[in-house]
Image (tube, grey):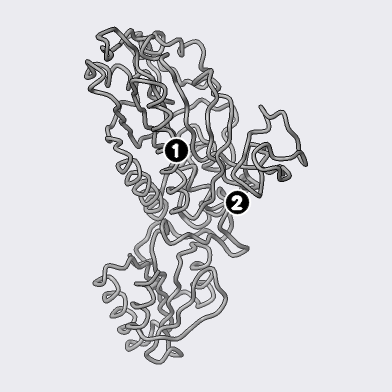
Amino acid sequence: MKYSKLFSKTLRQPPKEAETINHKLLTQAGFVDQLMAGVYSYLPLGLRVLNKIEQIVREEMDAVEGQEVLMPILHPKSIWETTGGWGKIDVLFKINSRTEKEYALGQSEEEVVTPLVMSRVNTYKDLPLSVYQIHWKFRDELRAKSGILRGREFYMKDMYSFHETQEDFLKYYETVKKSYLKIYEKLGLTAKVTEASGGSFSEKISYEFMVLTDAGEDDILYCSDCDFCVNVEIAKMKVGDPCPRCGGKLDQAKASEVGNVFDLGQKYGKDFNLSFLDREGKKSFPIMGCYGLGISRVMGVIVEKFNDEKGIIWPESVAPFKIHLIGLDQSEENIKSEAEKVYKQLQTEGIEVLFDDRVDVSAGEKFATADLVGIPYRIVISKKTEGKLEVKKRNEKTTEFMSLEDLLKLLAKS
């Protein structure tokens, strides 16, 4: 991609209404555009990041035998009345049609997925079964804030598993838990698993995956010596108390939820009266689990975690491009030709490149753009490089001159 052709250029200043780092940087760097509070357009750079996060999540869900589906966003009122959610869930967007029928916009999919799956499950031999989707969700938040961390419209992976027994669900939960932690590791994040109330989704204890960040909306108690972590809201402990798991001291921190697991029990099968025949030939309702992971939310958390005074610092796994190629002295034909040659060679090698080919822009402005956008490697070609490439990693201060061949070897190792 040539920067001169990219329609979502950087802004000189972040929007005045932006309060959080992710809102400021993602908007200023040209990744998102706010339509209204809690609702954003994802521009070419932002969509590339979103797609990469999505693919990492998809690969891990496939690895735990999740089967991908795509379910409707528009739901009939009747299914929400069946489960009691129509009058109980206050964040549910409700719509009146011209035919005087009422609908809801999906904020979760238990009401859709339960009839969908259980109409195809006859006996215990059809279980366990897991299906997931990656789709938009809608919640009527009173205070949509924190950039893309808390929106009225957001992109999410939600998976639902169906089990014969509670034991089988718990076994599968442990499998998914490991998969989630692997996802966050690939994204460059360290997540802690906390216990929390199931809220409107479940009366049982749920598990949340939290990343420590000052922009977080939750307060957690955690132990630095082991993986113990709990949400302050349900905790009977306080800062400085001994860890119940290892005896270390508990610390408190702000954290942002990036995933969750709910034990739904048999509620939804019973609500819809959808059962299967167990091993004794008797009618039984499935034990269900719900596994959420906010794709767009994770994108915001990554920006909150990885930035400096100059802009974003994307982990390589989700960066929109691997290389930010900068051509200086483009008015000189030989330099321009060399930059174009390197650009095409990198593309031929299958390396994603954003090429700043602008002629009427100063070197300082091009460097500032590169720092703001936050692509992992900055490569400069100019009169001073004399046939070499000036290479700098976004998260490092030093530069190095090397040949294209050496650069390709370096990139192959990363």
Q: Which disc, if any, is residue 202?
A: none
User: Helix, strand or loop at disc 2?
Assistant: helix
Location of the N terminus by quadrant is bottom left
Q: Which residue is mark 1?
A: 293
Rendering quarter of residue 309: bottom right
Rendering quarter of residue 60: top left
Query: Image height check: is 336 above or below 33?
Result: below
Name which of mark 1 and mark 2 comes first in the sequence: 2
- Indicate the position of residue 41 as horizontal and vertical percent values: 42, 43
Judged left or right of residue 113, residue 89 is: right
Query: Image height check: is 251 above or below 329?
Result: above
- In this view of the protein, which residue sits in the foreground, 204 or 246? 246
- In this view of the protein, which residue sits in the foreground, 343 or 240? 240
User: Residue pushed farthest front?
Assistant: 280
Residue sitting at 40 percent across and 13 percent down?
80
Q: Amino acid at mark 2?
A: Ile
Q: Amino acid at mark 1?
A: Leu
- In this view of the protein, which residue sits in the foreground, 328 or 192? 192
- Indicate the position of residue 157 as horizontal and vertical percent values: 39, 37
Residue sitting at 58 percent across and 51 percent down?
304
Few, some or many residues within 10 Å of mark 2 (<14, 14–19, 20+)? many
- Indicate the position of residue 90 as horizontal and vertical percent values: 53, 18
Nearer to us: label 1 or label 2: 1
Q: Which residue is mark 2?
A: 21
Rendering quarter of residue 65: top left
User: Residue pushed farthest right?
Assistant: 240
User: Helix, strand or loop at disc 1?
Assistant: strand
Residue sitting at 23 percent across and 22 percent down?
125
- Indicate the position of residue 180 as horizontal and vertical percent values: 44, 43
Residue sitting at 33 percent across and 44 percent down?
58
As measured in the structure, the alpha-carbon distance from the residue carrying label 1 to the one carrying label 2 is 21 Å
